[in-house]
Amino acid sequence: MADPSVEAPATPSSPPAGPKLETAMAEANKAYDRGDFDEAKSLAGRLLLGDPTNVRMLRIMVSASCLDGDTTVAQAHYAKLPPPDQEQMKVRCARYGITFPDN
């Protein structure tokens, strides 16, 4: 039997929470802002594994995918966004030639 006084170490795959989550999301935003779309998508994708409905990270995935012409990834994440965010992403992505089907 495990000793209850010994705290189990966090697993490396544990999604960040609280301040660590905010820091991780800020890093994804910074990567996007500096035009490092691959890094932004990588960071956002990792966070979405722990929280697939994180609107902030979904928006990064859609926007960065539109900017680099990855229609498949953009559409997959677009479908998970709430309607108001979908409308904003439609406008943004149309600038780069990416369109989404109307629901």
Image: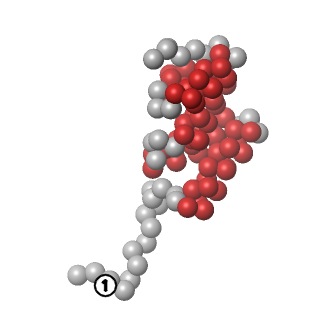
Mark 1, other Cα within 10 Å: few <14 / some 14–19 / many ≥20? few
> Which of the 4 image quadrants contains residue 3?
bottom left
**Residue 63 appears at what percent x and percent y?**
63, 29
Visible in this render: residue 59? yes
Vertical relation: 69 (above or below) 29:
above
Furthest-right residue in this view:
34
Furthest-left residue in this view:
1
Vertical relation: 22 (above or below) 71:
below
Secondary structure type for disc 1: loop
Q: Which residue does the image show at 43% across and 63% down from the upper left? A: 11
Q: Which residue does the image show at 64% across and 45% down from the upper left? A: 28
**Which residue lies under the disc numbered 1?**
3
The structure's colour scheme is secondary structure
Vertical relation: 42 (above or below) 63:
below
Relative horizontal placement of residue 81, taking residue 38 as reference (left or right): left
**Residue 50 appears at what percent x and percent y?**
45, 50
Furthest-front residue in this view:
84
Q: Which residue does the image show at 64% across and 56% down from the upper left? A: 23
Q: Which residue does the image show at 59% across and 41% down from the upper left? A: 56
What is the quadrant of the C terminus in the image?
top left
> Which of the 4 image quadrants contains residue 91?
top right
Relative horizontal placement of residue 89, taking residue 12 as reference (left or right): right
Visible in this render: residue 76? no
Name the kind of residue labelled 1 in the image: Asp
Relative horizontal placement of residue 38, taking residue 30 as reference (left or right): left
Vertical relation: 78 (above or below) 101:
below
**Residue 42 appears at what percent x and percent y?**
57, 41
Which of the two residues, 40 or 99, is positioned nearer the viewer here?
99
What is the quadrant of the N terminus in the image?
bottom left
Image mark count: 1
